[in-house]
Image: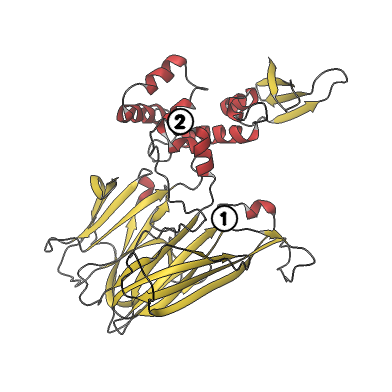
Amino acid sequence: MQKRLFLIIGFLVISAPLLLAQRSNRVSYVNLINRANAPQIFIDDILLPTEDGKANLSLIFRFDNDFLPYKKISVSDDITAPEGMQYYTIARLNSEIYKGKAGRRSSNLETATRDFWIDTLYTKTFDETESKSLYASGSLTNTLNPGLYNYVLQLSLMESTEERNSNRQNIHIWDWDKKPFGEIYLIKEKTKDDKLVLMNMDDNVLFGKDFMMLVRIPNYSNENDYNITISKARTGRRDTTKAETVYSAELANQEVMKGIIPQLTNGKEPAITYKNSENGYDYILVSIPNSGFENAAYIVEVTSPDQDKPVAKSFFKSYWRDMPASLLNLDVAIDNMKFIVSEAELKRLKSGDGKEKEQKFRAFWESKDPTPNTVYNELMAEYFRRVDFAFKEYRNPGNLNGHETDQGEVYIKYGPPTKKDRRFPTNGEVVEVWTYPNRTFVFQKTTGFGDFVLKATD
């Protein structure tokens, strides 16, 4: 499977962030909020063998709704929408595949093949147009002989004539019978009718969710032992290397599919189906217990004792879709704990180098984890979600940091009130009363900018 297709064509491509990946003090909370709210798309290219020794190059993609420019349907639009739909958008993605390897100056390239995808998408509500959990997905597939190729993608939205181009990407189509290593495909789930639904998030997998891998094993033998090892990845500027191993297992009990040809199908999401063939290849479908893995990057290797090099090797990262913005940076995360820890404790958490601070931060939240047997800490996630919500909800022209207002701080500590009551006295400023089961907070509007200050607590 070929990786790392980054589109830098005027729209944003966001890879899954790593928990506490950035530790620079130069990163502000506002920067992280903007990053967390950025639209997201995923594009990946995968290769599947055919029965006649060729390959199907499939470009699979996913565009989240908040990336797409939706428009409210009006009587002047020549659109026949399904019942109940109020917004629409049109997206088109073209692929152009050329022969040969592209260099710095690629011109007069011979076209090998091309394909396009176009669709009109609808939503019922405005909120759905800004959703990160709703998305459009599909694929572009072309059949190629073994050799070197390169390709470029063009995207247009709402029938715009201004297409935006991707970087040119080189790809090697192997002779499958001579290729010394196999491919690894990330599988979200296996359906009842045996379809293998692709993860379709580039090299990302959903944080805290188990998934599967479909691994092609060259020269598979029933006599050989096969093992899988998953290690944390240490990413550098020039290379990605293995760190500590987090999981290893024998593959003796995994599902083996011998002599099959995998094929890509398009339904609601791209999926792999397969058929038996005399010219087929051998695969193992491996279950991955990702619910026990931290939010990080990983290297996976499938090995056999009688082979010096891995039978197959790949890379994947955790993707926490609604990850609180603070957790993108350790220093910002610690700063935003000031509402629940003393000044002395905050000073202790901030002391030391990056590794020491991360250890103390993790220890603090692990001591309060309501489900210590899982990697997902519900209490920590809820706390930092409240910080994000307060930042957006209670900001005002007088204070752009809503989490640092009186209402923001109360929300962070106690969550949403069971009841809100806004009062408008004849003489005096507007008063807002937040009621909780065992306490009440009274806020008073002090300026014309919507700033409410805490005046009383019962």
| Res 441 visible | no
Q: Position of residue 371 (x, y in %)?
A: 43, 36
Amino acid type, callout 2: Val
Quarter holding residue 391: top right
Q: Name the residue under label 1.
A: 67
Label 2 environment density (alpha carbons within 10 Å; few <14, some 14–19, many ≥20):
many
Real-space Cα distance between discs 2 and 1? 27 Å
Quarter holding residue 456: top right
Q: Is mark 1 on a helix, strand or loop?
A: helix
Q: Quadrant of the N terminus?
A: bottom left
Q: Is mark 2 on a helix, strand or loop?
A: helix
Task: State the residue at coordinates (20%, 71%).
Answer: 220
Task: State the residue at coordinates (46%, 51%).
Answer: 14
Q: Where is residue 285 in the image (x, y as percent from the top left)?
A: 32, 65
Q: Mark 2 points at which residue?
A: 332
**365 sits to left or right of 255:** right
Counting labels gives 2
Residue 119, placed above or below residue 250: below
Q: In which quarter of the image is the C terminus?
A: top right
Amino acid type, callout 1: Phe
Task: State the residue at coordinates (48%, 42%).
Answer: 323
**262 sits to left or right of 398:** left
| Res 313 visible | yes
Residue 15, placed above or below residue 153: above
Task: State the residue at coordinates (37%, 68%).
Answer: 46
Residue 24, placed above or below residue 189: above
Residue 87, placed above or below residue 17: below
Of mark 2 and mark 1, the one earlier in the sequence is 1
Quarter holding residue 182: bottom left
Q: Nearer the viewer, residue 207 or 92?
A: 92
Q: Position of residue 44 (x, y in %)?
A: 41, 63
